[in-house]
Amino acid sequence: MIELYTAPTPNGHKVSVALEEMGLAYQVHPIDLSAGEQKQPAYLEPAHKVTGSRCVVPVLAAGIHVATTFKHAS
């Protein structure tokens, strides 16, 4: 199952929509932007890009990653 760390923002919703459209199972882990959770070290490695294959932050990169990684899953 995909673990989606996201906030209720327009960019945050884009990845959820992509996952729903592809019929992929995912679990949402909300990030509280007003509390500054997005600035914690776990979310910033390295420089808002990809940490291994688990953390994709920029919304376009996340969409491309989901589409290419899980294209045969549905």
Image (cartoon, rainbow, N blue to C red):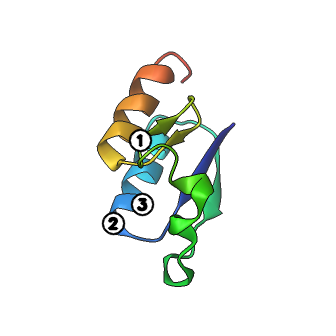
State the quadrant of the N terminus.
top right
As drawn, is 2 to the left or to the right of 47? right
Q: Secondary structure at mark 3?
A: helix
Dot 2 crowding, Cα within 10 Å, few <14, some 14–19, many 20+ = few
Name the residue at 56% across, 76% down: 32
1 or 2: mark nearer the eye: 1
Rendered view: 45 above or below 13: above
33 or 73, which lies in front?
Answer: 33
Label 3 crowd bin: few (<14), some (14–19), many (20+), radius 10 Å? some
Checking the image for residue 32, the label placed there is none
Q: Given the image, on which type of amino acid does mark 2 rest? A: Pro
Which residue is depicted at the point 46% across and 34% down? Answer: 22
Measure the alpha-carbon separation of dots 3 and 1: 15 Å
Q: For the residues marked 1 and 2, what is the alpha-carbon distance in whole angstroms? A: 19 Å
Q: Which residue is mark 3?
A: 12
Q: Secondary structure at mark 2?
A: helix
Q: Which mark is first along the chain, 2 or 1?
A: 2
Q: Which residue is mark 1?
A: 49
